[in-house]
Amino acid sequence: EDKVVQSPLSLVVHEGDTVTLNCSYEVTNFRSLLWYKQEKKAPTFLFMLTSSGIEKKSGRLSSILDKKELFSILNITATQTGDSAVYLCAVAQVFGNEKLTFGTGTRLTIIP
Amino acid sequence: GAGVSQSPSNKVTEKGKDVELRCDPISGHTALYWYRQSLGQGLEFLIYFQGNSAPDKSGLPSDRFSAERTGGSVSTLTIQRTQQEDSAVYLCASSLIDRGFSQPQHFGDGTRLSIL
């Protein structure tokens, strides 16, 4: 059975701290791994990773994929209260099976 | 439209009634997806459309659930004879297909369905 596991389930840090969120997966026919941020309603897209070892960066957020060890991390540096959200990791499988398999998410709370 | 639009945003209904949820994808997105998010759970895949056809219906939990898409655009998810366990947020997403591969999915705000 395809599986995506995120850790920790929740995390509370102070503003300015750096956090690392983890995502491991076991799926057949892996194609890409995606990170989303969910505040109140719609998950919003952050990154899509298809190749191992290539860091993707957007401002204070960055992510990298390890296809040998089957995991990804999402780093957030200099956290701000606006980073408080649930961060979702999802895995897409090869063309013909376009669904995303999601983990249950990491709830990140930033204390001012 | 600018983003994925879902309606209604909230729906409260009595057990046993039928409900219809609507999704209007981003203009030009040929792929459309339905997911369900129950309290404390991750998003659960329901069904995927490419154009008007549904190559993958594997996530529909029972034959009370059905979905259709017309004109390669708007989709409706129908739940017949609703049960309390159907209470959840139903999320729709759409994406482009580029050279045979799905680009990142973009989500609507969802419909929060509550069955009394």
Image: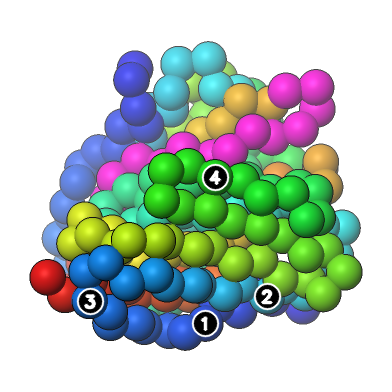
Q: Secondary structure at mark 4?
A: strand
Give residue A96's mark: none
Which residue in the structure is indicated by mark 3? A14
CB under 8 Å between discs 1 and 3? no
Q: Secondary structure at mark 1?
A: strand
Which residue is depicted at the point 50% across and 63% down? Answer: A75
Q: Which stretch appears magenta? A: B98-111
Which numbered disc, 2 or 4, marks the residue closer to the eye? 4
Which residue in the structure is indicated by mark 4? A57
Which residue is depicted at the point 27% across and 79% down? Answer: A13
Residue B105 drawn in magenta: yes
How far from the left and from the top, in percent, is residue A56? 61, 46
Which residue in the structure is indicated by mark 2? A24
Q: Amino acid at mark 1?
A: Ser
Q: Amino acid at mark 2?
A: Ser
Task: Using the image, determine if residue A37 lies above or below residue A10.
Answer: above
How far from the left and from the top, in percent, is residue B37? 40, 65
Q: In the figure, residue B20 lies in which quadrant?
A: top left
How far from the left and from the top, in percent, is residue A39? 27, 57
Q: Amino acid at mark 3?
A: His
Decide which of tag 2 and tag 4 comes sooner along the chain.
Answer: 2
Decide which of tag 3 and tag 2 comes sooner along the chain.
Answer: 3
Which residue in the structure is indicated by mark 1? A7
Q: CA distance from mark 3 to mark 2?
A: 26 Å
Q: Secondary structure at mark 3?
A: strand
CB under 8 Å between discs 1 and 2? yes
How far from the left and from the top, in percent, is residue B47? 59, 49
Letter of the chain that mark 1 sits on in the rendering: A
CB under 8 Å between discs 2 and 4? no
